Amino acid sequence: MAKRIIVLILVIFWLGLIFSYSGTVESLSAYQTKALFEKTVTFGIKILRGIGLVNRTYSQEQIDNFVNNYHLVFRKFCHFTIYFILAVFVSSAIKNFTIRFPLKAIIIVAIGFCFLYSITDEIHQLFVPGRSGNIKDCLIDTLGATLGAHFYYYAHIWFKKIKRKWLSRKLAII
């Protein structure tokens, strides 16, 4: 029962997170993601330098140029990732709240749910100053959800196999 509640809370939290980000005016949203991307790039360079994969230093101007050139790609990657995670949560919630519902059907329902939520998300943005609904974002969101649901599917199968092997070994000992 506790697992069901936790998964449901995760889904509701994630839906709220998406809704709140979509309600951010464009100028603030762009500023936030650009700042996050710059911190990510700077941190990544430090990590790569620390493990010896990068031997040179980059000026702030070079980092700014990189961030400006790839900011849009980063934003779309965020769309993809957010819906990937949503699909994993939704798939898990459906699995935990249904009895004997085929796993493939769960994946289809999760992708459909994420697609519909993506549409409502883009419609919501039509009412936010400076934002607009974008069908490309729906497609990116749905692609992320599709891969997230399939990730859940294959992870579920993999964990079932591991559990079976573990149980068979345990029973063999007895």
Image: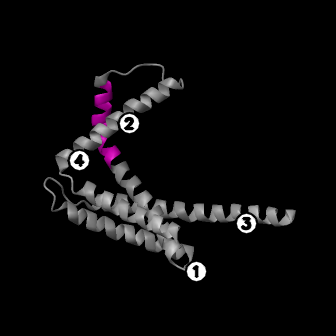
Q: Which mark is residue 164?
A: 3
**Residue 131 coordinates in the image, percent (x, y):** 18, 55
Labels 2 and 4: the sequence-earlier one: 4
Separation of residues labelled 3 and 2 (CA atoms): 40 Å
What residue is at 16 percent from the left and 58 percent from the top?
A: 128
Residue denoted by label 1? 100
Foreground residue among 84 and 13? 13
Q: Which residues are magenta?
A: 62-75
Three-letter code for the amino acid on which mark 3 is drawn: Arg
Separation of residues labelled 1 and 2 (CA atoms): 43 Å
Dot 2 alpha-carbon crowd within 10 angstroms: few under 14, some 14 to 19, many 20 or more? few
Separation of residues labelled 1 and 4 (CA atoms): 42 Å
**Residue 85 coordinates in the image, percent (x, y):** 44, 57
Task: Determine the secondary structure under disc 1.
Answer: loop
**Residue 20 coordinates in the image, percent (x, y):** 26, 57
Residue denoted by label 4? 29
Separation of residues labelled 3 and 1 (CA atoms): 18 Å
Q: Which mark is residue 40?
A: 2
Labels 1 and 2: the sequence-earlier one: 2
Residue most toward the front?
Answer: 2
